[in-house]
Amino acid sequence: MKALQYTRIGSHPEIVEIPKPAPGPGQVLLKVTAAGVCHSDEFVMGLSEEEYTGGGYPLPLTLGHEGAGIVEELGEGVEHLSVGDAVAVYGPWGCGRCQKCAEGKENYCLNAAAEGIKPPGLGAPGSMAEYMLVDDARHLVPLGDLDPVQNVSLTDAGLTPYHAIKTSLPKLGAGSFAVVIGTGGLGHVAIQILRALSGATVIALDVNDEKLALAKEVGAHHTVISDASAAEEIRRLTGGRGANAVFDFVGAEPTIATAVASAATEADVTIVGIGGGTAHVGFGSIAYDAALRVPYWGTRAELIEVLELARSGQVSVEVQRYSLDDGPKAYEALAAGTVRGRAVIVP
């Protein structure tokens, strides 16, 4: 079968031919219908040889941690699934035994690091192939009649902001303000989630008017150019109070500085992006009693909720489609910053 793989440290992903996998006991083989492209893939492929091997990533690596497919074959002992079922893949795989996994929070599995458990596309073979092997049926969520291409990105680009926002909802009632920094793949979905679930006025930041146009289209009340004066403009828009919750989907040094400077008293500052920045906080450098969080992905239950938001029409993803053969071009577009919303590879 064809697969899009990262084959050499420092190289670009390429299309290769590999054997079609067969499911073992408890596993499920999917015929892939859609696979999302993400900056996390770029992050992994940008690691040095020491960082890559030290992180336990294999070579070659089939990319794709956002996946959807049709059940092709069931391994021995798999129940409650049938061949032909349309499913989405829950990506943050855990051990299934620890306290966090028992709570449904496999994204915070306590044993994953020690046992070498990695998500598909970020260690395990991913979804950018004609077929994908899923380690356990519990990592599959019914997709039903949702279009897999339109909704596959919700498994990360929807789930990750949903998880981040849901924790801050008690602070986002009527009259509150929420800031979204970065209106790309995750950010443009975050704006919709905030509009669907909260009473907050949403302020969106990005680096140019073209990117902010998408933010306006999906529901941002205000848009601000993300530069050195952005925090001052947020203070003006909030009557000097600052934002009750700030979600940084970039995570670079300048955007984190803006996020911290924009926070109101008792606000949440949530760093989601993996841009390599570091927050500098201390008495006098951030608003009183503000909390800073660095969440990771989301729970299986939250993925079900995100898909329900899509089913009700409250959340949708701006998608650019690529064939599997054109998969390398999707990563070129991602690196160039020309993807509007989310790139999706369709085998």
Image (tube, rainbow, N blue to C red):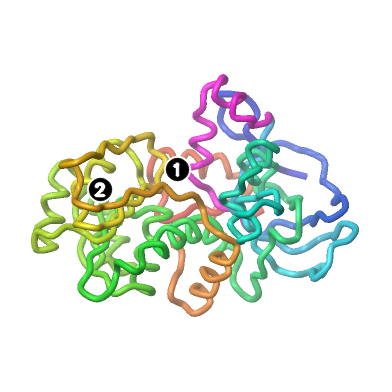
Question: Does 161 appear above or below 273?
Answer: below
**Is residue 215 rendered to the left or right of residue 263?**
right
**Is residue 181 rendered to the left or right of residue 310?**
left
Give residue 284's quadrant in the image: top left
Magenta residues span 34-59
| Residue drawn at the location 61% of the way across and 48% of the way down | 109
Residue 35 included in the magenta stretch of the image: yes
Q: Amino acid at mark 1?
A: Ala
Residue at the bottom extreme? 312
Q: Dot 1, how many residues are within 10 Å of its Cα: few (below 14), some (14-19), or many (20+)? A: few
Q: Which residue in the structure is indicated by mark 1?
A: 333
| Residue drawn at the location 41% of the way across and 47% of the way down | 294
Q: CA distance from mark 2 to mark 1?
A: 27 Å
Question: Does 92 appear above or below 117?
Answer: below
Q: Mark 2 or mark 1: which is in front?
A: 2
Report whether residue 126 is seen: yes
Residue at the right extreme? 76
Residue 242, given in percent of the width and then of the height, sits at 17, 57
| Residue drawn at the location 51% of the way across and 27% of the way down | 47
Q: Secondary structure at mark 1?
A: helix
Report whether residue 345 is seen: no
Q: Amino acid at mark 2?
A: Ala
Q: Which residue in the structure is indicated by mark 2?
A: 259
